[in-house]
Image: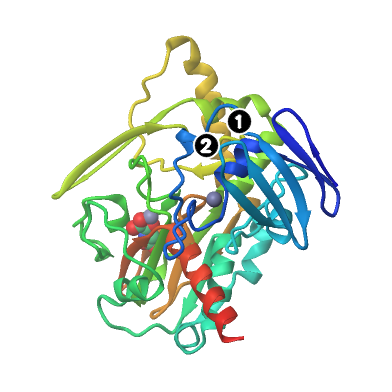
Amino acid sequence: MVTLNQTSLDIELDQPSQFHYVWLRDNCICSECMHPDTLERTLITAEIADDIAPQDAQVDKDSLVIDWNDGHHSRYPLVWLKSHNYSQSRFNSDPAAGEIKLWDREFQSRIPSYDYQALHDSQQTLLEWCCDLRDYGLTIVRNAPLVEGEIERFAEYVGVVREVIYDRLHNVRATPGEYNAYNVASTTLELKPHTDMPCYNNPPGVQMFHFLVNETEGGESTAVDGFNIAAKLKEQDPQAYRILATTPVSFQMDSARGDIASSNPLLTLDANGELKVFRFSNQLARPCNIAAEDMDDFYRAYRKIGRMIEAPENKVQFRLNTGDMMVTNNLRVMHGRNAYGGEGQRHLQLSYMDMDDVLSRIRMILKQQQEAS
Ligand code: OGA
Ligand code: ZN
Ligand code: ZN
């Protein structure tokens, strides 16, 4: 049942499976190799001998038992090997793993909307909201209390506030006809779909808005799924996609507290080539500093994606009223608003979190539910 090769062994689990000696030795779960209370690794990976190999390996009851040539003895439950079987497919042991669900204009009629009080009354509802935020990157919360600072409190209810060079809580308001703005959000002008804070190397992952009052004419909120735009671009124009994934774009933003600037591609890919972070902010982009021979091709790709972001078939538009919150995955979904006017007031407050905080909350609730059952 167990066959020893030069650097790995074969074992029949549900299917023929292969585990490397160094991997097995590294992941020994005995109390000498893993701290029994903290579950942290105490074995030092760098100290594993280059020629580590079993002297003997057997299946005993429900475990694989190995006597190693360094004198150590390990026992691996077969269920544990099955759930960490990297030789058949990539295992995912993260209970908070989700599924990205791309969307376009048609999403407008089914944007996940939750009642503020329900998110406080029921952990299950909070879990569902977190999962929708993870999978769609856009959610609405209705009927929040009309008190200043509520958005910061709500962020702390879900996770922790991510601080930026604005205060923990940021006010957005403008009086129609009166110019008091230090950025375009604080005018009455249209705000094109953008992600916030692309100037950070690590932009805040969750953007949270709370409308303390919205009685203006116009000013509807807009949103565009950046991952959907990127997927379409990749299909229609792979060269443009590649250019946007490899050309750094400079963004900068300052406040009384700081001046943040960095250059990163609009599309940040992970080690598997999957899109991880989408950045776009027409207003915060600074003169690009790329090689002369690349300039025309870059602008062709940059304008192309910009036109796709503006295309009505990719955009949702909805009215947020007094007491409403909007929460987005700011590493994926762009938000904006139409120009507004009229006599009424408009005042919103925003705070940030990171997506890690949302995933953390999902894991915590799942753990609680498991312990309770
Ligand atoms: C912002 C913003 C949207 C709005 O301040 O970053 O996107 O509706 N505001 O004013
Ligand atoms: Zn061990
Ligand atoms: Zn914004």
Residue nearest the viewer, comparing 113 with 353: 353
Q: Earlier in the sequence, mark 1 or mark 2?
A: 1
Q: Position of residue 23 (x, y in %)?
A: 61, 40
Measuring from the top left, give residue 223's x and y in whole percent. 52, 57
Secondary structure at numbered mark 2: strand
Q: Name the quadrant containing residue 238.
A: top right
Residue 283 x %, y %: 36, 42
Q: Nearer the viewer, residue 135 or 320?
A: 135
Pointer 2: what residue? 267
* Mark 2, other Cα within 10 Å: few <14 / some 14–19 / many ≥20: many
Q: Is residue 272 above or below residue 321?
A: above
Q: Is residue 122 above or below residue 177?
A: below
Callout 1 secondary element: helix
Amino acid type assigned to the residue bearing label 1 in the image: Tyr
**Residue 356 shown left or right of residue 311 in the figure:** left
How was the colour assigned to the protein in this rendering? rainbow
Image quadrant assignment for residue 160: bottom left
Q: Which residue carries the number 1 mark?
A: 241
Q: Amino acid at mark 2?
A: Leu
